[in-house]
Amino acid sequence: MRYKGFGGQLKTGPAIPSPNIWHWPEVYEQENRAQDADGALWAALAEVAPWAGLDVVDVGCGDGFHLPRFAEQARSVVGVEPHPPLVERAVQRGLDVRRGGAEALPLPAASADLVHARTAYFFGEGCEPGLAEADRVLRPGGVLAVVDLDFTVAPYGAWLRADLPRYDPAAVERFFARQGFDQRRITSTWRFPDRGTLEAVLRIEFAPATAGRAIAETIGLSIPVGYRLHTRRRPAGLLV
């Protein structure tokens, strides 16, 4: 799977390339527009970690696609992204996006109420430095919300596993449980304006053989996609 690999920044060293958005930002923009067409993800996030009037940080934000949605209600919204061309795209859109990695966020301690990371922490183990850094940036009582694709939900999960046969969904879920996260499963819908856009998105997300399979198995313009929403609240009253 050609995933948005910001999770690589959770370990020492450079960011793992994200071939989808790094190489095809315009197609990825269309993918973002198609995702969560029914609003299920946003509704679940707002229920467990409401951000109205609060300070939000979006980690691994790409060119800042989700920032305006947070900004509708938040007091402030800052994006963090390691890839300079995407930071530049965000700045050109008038968004506050800063270059940085998850293990060294360019933000002061106790400056955020919600740290959000979407399709960024796929592999679980190895993310510990990034999780600790999110805790540093969160105020007591703040929430770290990790939204990732659920490899156990067909059809999208089956295509993911075809490209990543060594991926162990149960092990990843156990990792987040050990780290003190609650988990919620959400099935959302990706809905595309036309067949050409749908096929272009699948081709940047999967290896050629898997993309061909996904295209053949998709009837119409919608794809049900499973997600995991992991949330962990920083205990109130901790000394910073």
Image (cartoon, rainbow, N blue to C red):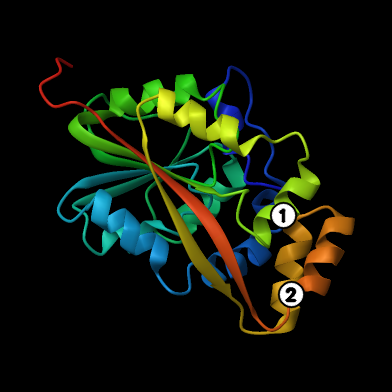
Residue type, numbered disc 2: Thr
The residue pinned by badge 2 equals: 218
Residue type, numbered disc 1: Ala
Q: Quadrant of residue 109?
A: top left
In the picture, the quarter occupied by the C terminus is: top left
* Foreground of the two, 122 or 11: 122
**Of the image marks 2 and 1, the number of the one nearer the N terminus:** 1
Number of the label disc, if any, that sits on residue 91: none
- Left/right of residue 207 with respect to residue 84 in the rendered view: right
In space, the residues marked 2 and 1 are separated at their CA atoms by 13 Å
Q: Is residue 127 placed above or below 53 in the rendered structure?
A: above
The residue located at (53%, 49%) in the rendering is 62
Number of the label disc, if any, that sits on residue 158: 1
- Left/right of residue 113 with respect to residue 29 in the rendered view: left
Q: Position of residue 1 (x, y in %)?
A: 74, 48
Q: Is residue 93 placed above or below 127 in the rendered structure?
A: below
The residue located at (75%, 80%) in the rendering is 196
Q: Secondary structure at mark 1?
A: helix
* Foreground of the two, 198 or 17: 198
